[in-house]
Every structure is written in C-alpha cells, then in structure tokens.
Image (tube, rainbow, N blue to C red):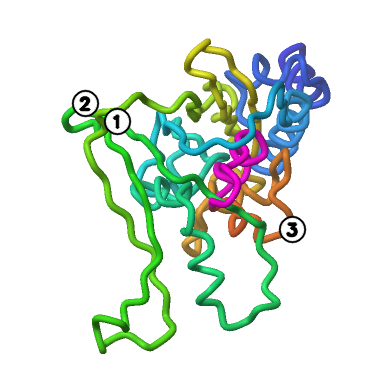
Amino acid sequence: MHEFMKFLICPLLFSGLVACTSHQPIEKTNRAEVAAAMFHERCKLSGEKIYRTVKDVDGIFLLKIRPQGENFSSQYLFDDPYGNDLGGQAYIRSFLHGSHLTNLMNMKDSSINSPSRTGYSYVDVVEPADGKRYRYTGRIEEPALTDSAYLKGYMKFTHSRILANVPAPRYGITYEDISTRADRDYWIAGSSLKIIDLNTNEVIAERVGYLYDAGQGETSGGRAPWIWAADHSCPSFGPSPAFSSQQNQTVIFAEKVLHPLKGK
C-alpha cells in the first residue's frame, strides 16, 4: 500500500517528480501532466539577460555553427532543439548584411510582416576540417544581368569566404544545450545562447529558453516531436505553428545586443 500511495501522490509534488517516476510506470496522460509541471518550473529560469549593448559592430565571430540536419524526433540528442535555426552555411549567411533584405526584395506580398534585421559586414568562422578561421562576406546580385535564365528584377544573395589573416572580431556568439537527462525523459529541452566579449571573456548577454513536447514523443502520422514542441516554449515563439518562427532567431537576438554598424 505504501508504494501504491507513493505512486498516486508523486505527480502532485514537483519536488518528487523525477525521483518517484524512476521505477514506476506512468500512463501517457500522466506523463504529459508531469512534463507540463516540470516545464513550468524550468520556465522560471528562462528569459533574456542583456548586461551590455554595443554600437557600430562591423563583424562577429560565430564560435559554434548550427548543424545542417534537423533533429525531428531524437529524444536524447542534446543538440539544442529550442535554438533550432537555419543550419550550416545558411546559418552563417543569416548574419550577413543583405541576406534578409534579398528575401524582402523578392517577396510579392509587401504586406508580409517580418522582423527587421540589418546583418553584419562579415562573419568569422573556424572551419572544423582544417582548424583555420575564415571570413564570410555577402553581396546582392541581379543574375538576369548576366544570365537570361533568370527573370529581370530577381535579386540573389551570394557569399564568399577567404582565409582570415586579420584579427578576429571582438564579439562571439555561441550556444549550448542545457537539458538534463531527467528533462529529456519528459521531452523537455533547454537552451543557452550567449554573446561574449572575447577580449575580456565577459558574457554580455544570454538568452535561456525551454520547450517541451506535449505529445511526449508521439510520432504517428509522421509527427515530429521536437518541431511541435515549439508550441510550448518560454520565451514563447508565438502562436502555433510556432516552429515557423524559430529560423533566424539567433541573429534577431544578436542584433538586440550587437547593433550593426550604421549604413550597413
């Protein structure tokens, strides 16, 4: 009777949630309730903390690149589902001046509301393959001027990179997954996004966020748990489907702290 009563009261007390569920089976509906309670506790730690802002930043150093592939349903892959953004070179390009502007120039519906972004003149990245630092820059082109296969007026953003033989940018951006194993047991993922003054190793801004999958890993019908988890996030990504607002989230936060150089 003692163990049975323990099972009944555990979901009611957050302090005993993880310990009480390690040996007892939990029905799916109860799991969702436990996950929601744990998530709301984690949310008390979430939010943006901006300790210092910097004006006229020309370039930044991306200390860590988002992976090319997207994690749809891997429960224990600690790759920061909350921070899900563009991946690979698309992630790098999203920080460059002109990248967002090109998309707006090609939109047919001018009423589309999109967060304004400026972008930076250059972005430095260390290439894992050779350990060398490269500098990325971007530009807007009209392909129709040299290639008749393109429609006149269509604008294209392109980038180039060179080996960086100049000092690295002062400010770096990085992220990490701060989930625990207990979090992931209930499909909760935590994220830390930091902006660092590399001259002093000072964290000048940090955003902590959490999300959880209310379906507790349900994949029937092609459902992707981590994608739909964005509907339950703090800070919130907005109304469902919230995952559509995750792209470019990193550069949006970066520009709140590191204001791009005027005229760029």
According to the picture, the residue beneath numbered tag 2 turns out to be: 131
Q: Secondary structure at mark 3?
A: loop
Residue at x 44% of width, y 84% of height: 153
Which amino acid type corresponds to the residue marked 2 in the rendered image? Gly
Q: Quadrant of residue 243?
A: bottom right
Q: Secondary structure at mark 1?
A: strand
Viewer-nearest of labels 1 and 3?
Answer: 1
Residue 189 sits inside the magenta stretch: no
- Residue lying farthest to the left in this orientation: 130
**Magenta residues, as a range?**
248-264
According to the picture, the residue beneath numbered tag 3 turns out to be: 239
Which amino acid type corresponds to the residue marked 3 in the rendered image? Pro
According to the picture, the residue beneath numbered tag 1 turns out to be: 126
Circles 1 and 3, Cβ within 8 Å, touching? The answer is no
- Location of residue 150 with respect to 205 vertically, above or below: below
Q: x and y percent of residue 43 in the render?
A: 75, 30
How crowded pointer 3 is (Cα within 10 Å; few <14, some 14-19, many 20+) is rated as: few
Which amino acid type corresponds to the residue marked 1 in the rendered image? Val
Viewer-nearest of labels 2 and 3?
Answer: 2
CA separation in Å, label 1 and label 3: 36 Å
Q: Quadrant of residue 44?
A: top right
**First reached walking from the N terminus: tag 2 or tag 3:** 2
Taking depth in this image into account, of 77 and 173 the one nearest to the observer is 173
**First reached walking from the N terminus: tag 2 or tag 1:** 1
Residue at x 27% of width, y 30% of height: 133
Residue at x 55% of width, y 44% of height: 251
- Location of residue 227 with respect to 222 vertically, above or below: above
